[in-house]
Amino acid sequence: MGARKYNKYGNHKQVVDGHKFDSKAEAMYYGQLKWLLQTKQIKGFKMQQRYLLQEGFKKNGKTYRKIEYVADFEVEKLDGTIEIIDIKGTVTKEFLIKRKLFERHIWILLKYDRDRGFVEVS
């Protein structure tokens, strides 16, 4: 049997329906979204959507690259609103900065709890 692949936070990568997920919890949430779509509780969802947080620019001869955030899921609810969903086991300083830049969107951060299922992290 081959070696298991883990990301830098110790999560075991998963493949479901040909899609690669960074964690088991993220793969489980994908399954939940598929069920919500099938039962017509959401209009749709997208995975790994990129959002521009800051344009690239030049200043004093130095080039600064654009800053993007790649969210785990973008969910379109029945009323047409869009929620940005991220599944995190570890909240990093980098994530907190990007979240602040992205706060104008409807943003939901979830963590999987074995006893309670997916719970929102504030």
Image: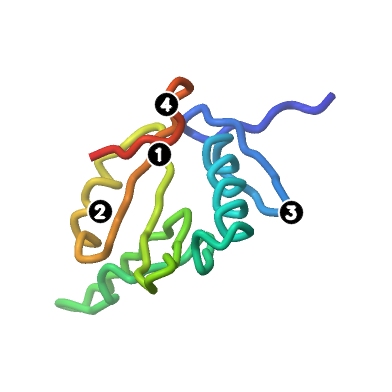
Amino acid marked by disc 2: Arg
Name the mark on residue 70.
Answer: none
Q: Is residue 113 above or below residue 62?
A: above
Could you tell me which quadrant the N terminus lies in?
top right
Ranked by sequence position, the earlier of labels 2 and 1 is 1
Proximity of marks 2 and 1: CB atoms separated by less than 8 Å? no
Q: Is residue 118 above or below residue 101?
A: above
Q: Secondary structure at mark 1?
A: loop
Name the mark on residue 18.
Answer: 3
Q: Disc 4 or disc 3, which is closer to the eye?
A: 4
Q: Looking at the picture, how far across and down is residue 48, in whole percent?
A: 51, 60
> Taking 29 as reference, is 93 left or right?
left
- Residue depicted at x 51% and y 27%: 10
Q: Which residue is mark 2?
A: 99
Ranked by sequence position, the earlier of labels 1 and 4 is 1
Q: Which residue is mark 1?
A: 88
- Residue depicted at x 23% and y 73%: 62
